Amino acid sequence: MTASPQTPIPQGKYISAVRYENLIWTFGMTPRDNGILIKAGKLSNSDTLADYQHAVRQAAQNTFNAALNTLADGQIIARLITFTVYVNAEAEIKDRFFYVNEDYKGRKRQFFENYGD
């Protein structure tokens, strides 16, 4: 790894990532760019994927950046075991995870092309 990506700044009393041996956990990622929240509020029935795509990408990138910053030089992330996302959405939205899932598939592929094995 040539340059460390920017680690997201926790918005509470926690750290953004912790590593224990060969496992990394990340915590509390929000769609912040340089500490500025880029999307707030609840996902509603009138929203489209395009309305939230940038925010989803930013939160995913923050997660990956936090994980990457736990690695020593030359180390890689070989496998992503789990990726849990919480979406602030109106209760009646049935497809809320579609927003994350559709973007995450491409984001994961891009991440491993750049940083993984």
Image (cartoon, rainbow, N blue to C red):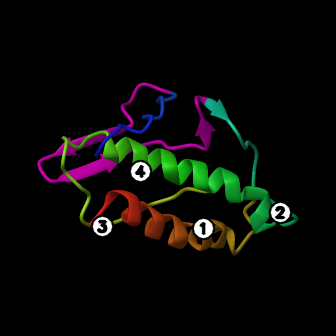
Q: Which-is-in-front pick, marks 2 and 1? A: 1
Q: Is residue 25 magenta?
A: yes
Q: Which residue is tagged 3? A: 81
Alpha carbon distance from label 3 to label 1: 18 Å
- Mark 2 — residue? 47
**x, y percent for residue 7:** 42, 34
Q: Mark 4 and mark 2 in contact (Cβ < 8 Å)?
A: no
Instruction: Work out which residue is located at the far left of the displayed protein and give it.
Output: 21
Residue placed under numbered mark 4 in the picture: 64
Which amino acid, mark 1? Asp
* Local SS, label 3: loop
- Range covered by the magenta-colored residues: 12-35
Mark 1 or mark 2, which is nearer the start of the sequence?
A: 2
How far apart, in angstroms, are the residues tagged by discs 2 and 1?
A: 15 Å
Q: Are marks 4 and 3 in contact (CB under 8 Å)?
A: no
Q: Is residue 88 visible?
A: no
Task: Tell which circle, 4 or 3, labels the residue nearer the N-terminal end.
Answer: 4
| 45 shown above or below 25 | below
Residue 75 sits inside the magenta stretch: no
In the image, residue 74 sits, relative to residue 45, either above or below, namely: above
Disc nearer the start of the sequence (1/4):
4
- Count of picture labels: 4
* Disc on res. 103: 1
Callout 1 touching callout 4 (CB < 8 Å): no
